[in-house]
Structures are given as C-alpha cells and as structure tokens.
Amino acid sequence: PPPPPTTTTTTTTDSSTMSVVPGDASKNARFLWNALYVVGLANALGYIVVNEAYKIRLHAIEEYGIIIHEFDPYFNFRATEYLWEHGWRKFATWFDYLVWYPLGRPVGTTIYPGMQVTACFIKKYIMTSWSLNDVCCFVPAWFGGIATVLTALLAYECTVETLQPNGKGDEVPSFTSILKHIPGVNLLYDHVIVPIINFICDSLEKYIGIHTLWGLRPRHDTSANLPKMHSPSLECGLFAAAIMSIVPAHLMRSVGGGFDNESVATTAMVLTYWLWVRSLRVSPAWLWGILTGIGYFYMVASWGGYIFCVNLIGVHAAVLAWGLGRFTPKLYQAYTCFYVVGTALAIQVPVVGWTPLKSLEQLGPLGVFIGFQLMQVCMIIKKSQEKKLGRPLSMKERWTIRVAVFGSVGVAVAIAGYFLASTGYFGPISARVRGLFVKHTKTGNPLVDSVAEHQPASNKAYFQYLHDVCYVSPVGFALVALFYFSDASSFLLVYGGATFFFSNKMVRLVLLTAPIGSVLAGIALGHAWSWCYSALLNVFGGAWEIVSPPKKEPKNEDTTEKTKGKKTKAKGGAKASKDTKDTKAEGSFKSGMIKIVINIARLAVGAYLIHLGIPRAKSFYDTCHMMATHISNPSIVLKGTDNSGRTVYVDDYREAYWWLRDNTPEDARIMAWWDYGYQITAIANRTTIADGNTWNHEHIALLGRALTSPEKDGHRIARHLADYVLLWTGGGGDDLAKSPHMARIANSVYRFMCPGDPTCRNFGFVARGTPTPRMGGSLLYKLHSHRTTPGVEADKNRFREVYSSKHGKCRIFKILSVSQESKDWVKNPKNRDCDVKGGWFCRGQYPPALRKVLEQKQDFAQLEDFNTNRDDSEYQKQYFEHLNDPNKAANRAMQSGIGSGDGEKKRLPRLPKEQIAKLNDNWHDSDTLTAMWEFISKNDAPGVISMLRTNPEAAHLRSADGRGPMWWAHEFGRAKIIKILKSVGVSETEMDDDGMRPVDLSKSR
C-alpha cells in the first residue's frame, strides 16, 4: 500500500525486500527498482536454477549413454513398454508369467502406474519423435527441474503474510509466534517474553532511531492497526529452489536413467504440499482443497510413499484444530475437500483399492476427517441454539453439545470397529512401516532387514546427502516457529519433525528431507540476504534524507484568511517559519546520518557473513556435483581404469543377460537371487524365479533354501524350477557376500536350516575367505567358487558352466537332469488357479514334485499381523536377541552343535603328532593367524571352533615371533579357548622367540 503522508519509508506489498526511498517524488523510481529486482529474481529462478537442476542430472547420460539404471527401473521400463504396446485395458489385467515362476504376478493390480502413464503421455503428445527408452531415461531429469520450481512455490507460500479475520470483525496480519498458541506457554509469552522484547525494541527505536526491527517485534497484537510484517518471500523461494536443484538427497532418486517411482513421486508430493498450504492461505479454500486432492491422487498413482503424504497432512490439520485451537472454516473446507476428493480418486488406483478405509496405516487421516465433521456439526448446533435462545451459549453448554455428539458417534464407531476387526477387515501395518516405530534397528523380517536402504540413517548419511543444509535448516525452522508462524507455515514445522524422525529410522527416507530441508534453509538464507540487501537500500535512503529538502507543509486556507492583513503578526510568523524549517532540516540531517551509520554497520556484518558463506556455498556446490557423479553410476555398467590409466567400462552384467537372450530357449527359466530378476526379465526376456517386488516371502525363502542348501539338496529343488543358474561373482557385493542373508530368509520359513539360531551364524566366513562348513558345502558356494578356489568344484553330473563374463562378474551354469515333467505341468493352463472361471487372474502352482519340500515350510508371520492365529513370538524373540547380542547367538550355536553342519555335536578334528611338530617348526605370519588372533582377542570361542572345524591346522600355526593361538589365549586370559586348544593337542610348554611359554604369560598377567 502507498505510505502515509508523514512517512518516508515505504514497504513492498507482498514480495520481498523492504525498500527505503523517501518522498512521493521517488515513487516512480521506487516502483521501477522493485520491478527490476523482482524480474531479476524470477529470471534467476527460471533460468539459472532450473537449468542447473536439469544439467546436474544428466551426468549419467553424458558419461554412460541413454541407459536405464539399477534394478527397479528395469521393471518400470518393461511395464511402460507393455502399457505403450497394449494400452491401459490390457495393462490393468496383465498377469505376467515371466516372473515369480511358477506363480506369476498380477502386474496390473500390484503396480503404482503413475510414472508409466506419465512416460507414455510424454511420448505420445510431447516427445513424439523420441524412443520410449530415451523418454524414460530423461523423465527423472525433467521432473527434477519441476520439483525445484514447486519447492520454490512451497517456500514462497509459507513466507507470504496475508490478512485474516481476528474474530472481532477485523482483518489482521497472519504471522505470529507458535508460543502464543501453546496452552500454558502462551501466558508466559504474553506476560513475560513479549514485554521484555518490546522494551528492548522501544529503547532501540527511541535512542537509535530504528523504526523497524526487521520483524523481530513480537506479533501478539490482534488489532486491525497492526502493520503488515515484512517477509522476503521471493528471496526465500529462490534460495530454496537453488538448494533443491542440486542437493544430493533429491539427486539420489532423480538422475537421468534412474527411472524409479520416487523421481516422479517427489514432484507429486511437493505439488500436493504446495496446494495444501495454499488452500490454508487464500480463498476459496474449498477450490484449493479439491486441487490438493487431485495432486494427492497423482502422488498415490506414482508411489507407495503416498501413505506418508496423507498422514502428514492429516497430522497437520489435527495439530491446527486440536493442538493449537485454530479450527477455522477455511481449515474445515480445505481438509474436507482434500480428503473426499483425494480418497475418492485414490481408490481408483488398482493397487490401492479400498486400503485408505481398511489399512491401519491410513485410518488416522480418516479419523481426522470424521472429527472435523463432528466439530462442524457441533458448530451448527451451537449457532442454532444461540439463535433460538437469543444469547451466546455458556462454556458448559458448548461442552455438553460436544460430549453428546462425539460420545454418541464414538460409541457407534467403536462397535462397528469391533465387529469389522473380528472379520479381518482391517489390514495390518507393513513390516517396513512397523520398523519405523519399534525400538530395534531391524523389523523382525530378515527379507526386509537384508535391504541396505532399510537400515537406520547415521549422522554421516545426513551430511552426505544434505551437507550444510543440516546446519542451516534449523535456523529456518526457528524463524518460522518464533516469528513467522501461521496456518500455512506451521506445515513446515510438522513436515520437518516427521521427516527427521522417519529418515532417522530408515536411510532410504532421507529422500524426504530434500524438499523440507531446502525450504527451511531457503527461508534462513532468504532472510539473511534480505537483511543485508535492505541495509544497502537504507544507506541510500539516509543519504537522500540529508541532501533532499524537507517536504513543504500544506497550506491551511482558514488560517490564511484569519491572518490576512495583519503585517506585524505575519512578520513574526515568517521568523517562526524559518526557525521551523531549520529545525526540520537539522532533524532530517540527524535522521539520515543515524540511518547511514546503522545500516553501514549492518552492511559490515552482512559483508562478513557473505565472506564466511561464499566458501561454504562453493563447498556445497562442489560436493553436490561430486555426489551427482557418484550417484549417476548406473551400477549395471561399471567404470574403472586399467594399469596404464586407460578408462575401462565393465559391462559384464548386460553381456550376461544378452548371452541368455541369444543362447537359451525362449522358455528358459533362470534361477538367480531376487535382486537381478527385474534386469533378467527386461534385458534377457527370460523367466525368473523372483524379483524386487518381494511380495511372497515364502517363495523367496524357497529360492534361498535352494541356493544355501548342500549342493545335492539344492539341485533337487532347482531341477523342478529352473534351467540355468546365474550368479553375480567377482567380489564386492556379489552373491557370496549376500548369502548369509539368503540363509536367514530361508530359515525364517524352513526352520531346520539353522536350528536354534534365526541369524544363521553358522553360514558365513570364519576368516578372510574361509567359509564355515555349512557355507562351504552349499550349492551357491560350489557354483560361485567353481575352479577359482583350490579344491572347489561343482558336481559335473548336476551342473555345467556355460558362460563366464569377461571380467568375472557373472557366471551362468546349466542345470542338468532338469525335470521336463514339472516344466510341462506348470506350463499347462489347466493347472493354474483362477479367481473366477475364464478370468484373467490365474495364479500358477508349484509342480507336484515339490510337494514334500513345501510341506516342510512354516509360513512366516509378521509381528504386526494380528489377523493370524499362529504365534511365532519365540522365533522373533530369538531373532532380535541374536541381532542385538551376537556373542549370545554364538554361544547358543556352539552349545547346540550348529557349527557341525548337520545339527549334531562333533568333536574337533585332531592332527597327528608328526604334522603338529612340523607346523610348530614353521614360523610365519598369515591371514589365518590374524583371524585366530581376532577371535581370541574378542573371546569369540564359537569363532575359534568354526575355524578349527574348517582348518584344524590353525590351532598349531606359529607367527614370525614364534607365538600362536595358545600364547594369545593365555595372554588375554581366555580359559574357555585354552581348553578348546588343549583338546586338539596344542602344547603349553613350547617356547617362542624370546623363550617364553604360554603358561609364563598367564603368570605374568
């Protein structure tokens, strides 16, 4: 609004920085300057920031070409191809028999199709000349740029102050402090904190001449005379976008080629949040509530993380209404329209269906919706009663209405809920969601726990993916809470708290911190920039006051008529007028000088902050680009250098899949761990046993059993399910490294695999490269180490190696003696189980030859599944005990004889005396001795036993100084291990290089 006549300071209305240019004469210049400033910010957002967001996501495409990355994106691409070729109707009823053999998968009802539909839409209407592969590779980069713009809008929306009703017929500015709305704290805030801060502000204004405290004066007044608060909304939005454009927490799921659900879902999520906060700020709220529901529908269609989105909005609405007492017609309209429209559209997504009204994970928002309707009913009854009685209702009468309405509905809901629960209507909380709330760092499900991204986040992970945003965003959080709190901006507080809690539980959810971290950090930086920038303008404003003449007072006609013709008084009046002008000039000079001095000091502080901030900003920028390069590694193609320094691309995985495509029958079935199922199906176009959908725990356990069982037993299962076995080899995170997880998953269903030990400590390594007896005899180890480890060779009557990749990353074995009878039985459509006769939903069945194997399974029961009558608490109890106390697990394993490999106790092998003497005479260091020292120093008796079962010579080996396991056992005082070593014939009287015997170390100790 234009400034009052006596004011020389003017403020921009909605946007941004406070400009200080006095007088009406400068109005045009002020308008032009503000316009140029806003255009400059918009240009920076529209070109520089968005362009950077797009370019940084193209590292992978520029380095590796236009290829799909990772594992899940290959399924997404294959599904997109199917949708493009067959249309939506067939896609929605697609039962895929190339996956999860022999069961198959109903893809149409188990996929979130939003990203596939989006890619096909872009291909059909926008990028018509591009291939579908190219469109899918670029979708993450495009949506990364869109998410950047939406983050700017979210930050802008939460920092724009508007006028809102105060309940007294007036409109007052919306910004206040959260302290004013917390019961109990508000009294301390109003009567202690506010007076103290006001006294400080008044003193500064009186003695220094500062007429604005940059928004630091408490916003506790509810009168209509309260001036509108300055908030640099454009600057906050620009900084938020700049951070979001390159922050690694967002890059991790939005690089070119990473055709994953989150790349689109993050954009849909930020869109939903922006529409939600806007519905709380502008009118009509019902319209923006409807748009929020539509945005939420796109989020639901794109990613299963929509549950977080709807619950977050529900919690925010509940906090406003019942936590802070800010239930308003605008909030009611916005949430009601959002929930009705959003839920009505969400249930149209096949994979979602009626779960918003059945799943415990989504009943919270439903409860908020019902609560809002009851509150509205109470308000209607209240107004009706007041109109009827002709007076306001008392507090007691109002509470009587609320108790009656909520009580009657609550009883009805409780009764209905009880009967519905008894029928199994309500679905359980999933293992992944449950893992976010339990005190353990694991979920109790070894399949979920085997995935690295489901592990808790560490401080290192936060800094890796957010960098300095970790330190700046809390400042923005405090600014919003203490000075810029409103219905809209309060969403950031709920969002920030929830995101930190959940991301701390699961490192994958660090992805969710990107938008809120960027917004909060953008708010902090936007205010800092505005503070410095307005100081610069104020310096010029103060200088203008010094050099410009004081504004002339307007003439009063009445006074002129009365004094007309009175010369003597006119003469004296002229002198008084001169004195007044001199006084005003002196005041203007003084005021201008004070402004110059104060704002030069601010400029000095701002310059110092910029001096400190530029290196940090450069470090943030460089780190983000370094992380972008790292994240852009497609994993299916590796990059390295050879001895000559020449760049080498390792393409073993795709070459192995191409070999399968070109050299195996079209109906060939490939047994591989579930990680690679998506890639094999998409690239090789061959049938797989399992993939990353992981919908059937028991089926993956059967696969794990086949791979971790002894070679003979594993072959008996594999010959009925597959024609080839594909393994990832070559070290690192290959199949051998993953095999302990395979054993745990297998044991969760087939409990005899690792009896008494849910964590399967007997399946692993006892030393560097030395497997336990159970691992050493497994099918996986035999194939993995076939003719590459001395003495290890697969049974030539059961398996034949047919392919080994160039760099040893993949090996493929043909399964011999495959059961053609089982293969034909599964292929026959008559043996499929259809939900209705002639329907499309027909699940495959296991061949009869596996019936005895399947009878040995015990279906895995989730802790949270209350709809089952089976109690599996003892297994879960042991699972968590063994995870939290590995030594306890090891002792149990040793006591039950698990280390033997067949569940029975066996004596440790004892070497002949001649061989022991020969070993005692050969002193040298070795990896085996290092492993023994580690076991003994940690008092790991089971580890020593496992080592001696695999390598009996380890007990008698001597290091370069003549010492060995017996010396170390005496040195550390390990009585139990001393007893074990003596049982295999280790002497206590041998001497080391210094003439010390093992028993001498015990005496000296």
Image (tube, grey):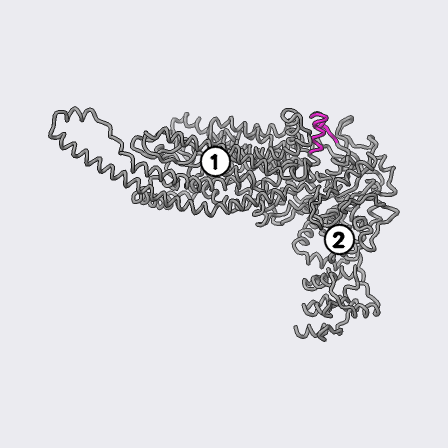
What is the quadrant of residue 165 in the picture?
Answer: top left
Q: Residues within 10 Å of mark 1 (few under 14, many from 20)?
A: many
Q: Amino acid at mark 2?
A: Phe
**Vertical placement of residue 737 versus 53, above or below:** below
The kind of secondary structure element at disc 1 is: helix
Which secondary structure class fits the magenta region best? Answer: helix
Tell us which disc is closer to us: 2 or 1. 1
| Sequence-first disc among 2 and 1 | 1
Label 2 belongs to which residue? 763
Label 1 belongs to which residue? 158
Q: Is residue 495 visible?
A: no
The kind of secondary structure element at disc 2 is: loop
Residue 532 coordinates in the image, percent (x, y): 41, 41
What is the quadrant of residue 935 in the picture?
Answer: bottom right
Residue 398 coordinates in the image, percent (x, y): 44, 33
Question: Range of the magenta residues?
Answer: 77-95
Q: Nearer the viewer, residue 1002 or 771?
A: 771
Q: Amino acid at mark 1?
A: Cys
Residue 47 coordinates in the image, percent (x, y): 53, 33
| Disc number for residue 576 | none
Assign the N terminus to one quadrant of the image: top left
